[in-house]
Image: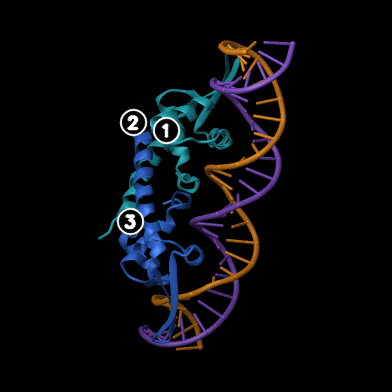
Chain colours: A cyan, B blue, C purple, D orange
DNA sequence: AGCCTTCATGTAGACAGACTACAGTAGATG
DNA sequence: CATCTACTGTAGTCTGTCTACATGAAGGCT
């Protein structure tokens, strides 16, 4: 799975997993790995900046907690995040249809 | 259609349209627009560098011709380009399955 | 005690692909 | 004669993902 392919889609993926339940960064990486059958293994240096970007955009809200001596910053979807996710799901469907149409031999 | 979404997929799209018949840059843009129902409108400043990149990578070969006073550089798929396209089609299927799986509500 | 692994967050800097904006030529149309 | 379409191309910017690094605590192993 090449890195460039993900470009522009990672945000949607993150919003989608956080939509099910609030998660902290490390757990988001594991959720993506699990949901993709191990095919998505996003490095921390990609996820943490993405989370800050999404929070700055108003799509996520975050709060600190401590569990067993571990500091966790847990993210949850804002209402704007819900709307963004809905839009991005539609955009993904449209995008994948277009690419599949061009790519499939006629 | 956001620009970043295309990132990493444009090469496959170009190879796919050139696979059907050799085309020059301008015609490639029109082919992509046509095949996508007008949704893909790639600017020349994106396509021409991409074509040079693909030729440098050995996936395309090019030759000049003149039709009605118009200079055209026509690109065709090399054998390496055929192999690359086949691989990239498979990668697209895998990628779109993964994204759809993560994105679809469970 | 010392060491490694896992859990957990984060920053700095490099890289590359798609973008905007510009630049130019030639034929066709009003 | 001006504008549009066809056609190719370059320069520079932008930004998201990457690698590599830095930090620290809990728990297991020897």
Q: Which mark is residue B105?
A: 2
Which comes before the other along the chain, label 3 or label 1? 1
Quarter in which the C terminus of chain A is drawn? bottom left
| Residue B61 percent coordinates (x, y) | 44, 71
Instruction: Kindly tell me whether residue B40 is visible in this rendering.
Output: no
In this rendering, the answer to whether B28 lies above or below A14 is below
Label 1 and label 2: CA atoms lie apart by 19 Å
| Residue A45 percent coordinates (x, y) | 59, 36
- Chain letter of disc 3 in the image: A
Q: Residue B77: which quarter of the image?
A: bottom left
Helix or strand or loop: what does disc 3 sit on?
helix
Q: Which mark is residue A38?
A: 1
Instruction: Kindly tell me whether residue B64 is visible in this rendering.
Output: yes
- Chain letter of disc 2 in the image: B
- Chain letter of disc 1 in the image: A
| Residue D11 percent coordinates (x, y) | 64, 67
Q: Which mark is residue A103?
A: 3
Does residue B106 appear left or right of residue A44 in this picture?
left
Does residue A44 appear left or right of residue B62 in this picture?
right
**Residue reaching furthest to the left:** A106
């Amino acid at each position: 799975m090449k890195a460039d392919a993900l470009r522009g889609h990672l945000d949607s993926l993150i919003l989608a997993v956080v939509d099910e339940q609030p998660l902290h960064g490390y757990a988001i990486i594991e959720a993506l790995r699990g949901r993709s059958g191990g095919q998505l293994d996003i490095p921390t240096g990609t996820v943490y900046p993405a989370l800050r970007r999404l929070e700055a955009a108003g799509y996520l809200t975050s709060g600190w907690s401590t569990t067993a001596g571990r500091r966790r910053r847990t993210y949850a979807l804002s209402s704007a995040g819900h709307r963004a996710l809905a839009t991005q799901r539609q955009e993904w469907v449209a995008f994948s249809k277009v690419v599949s149409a061009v790519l499939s031999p006629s």
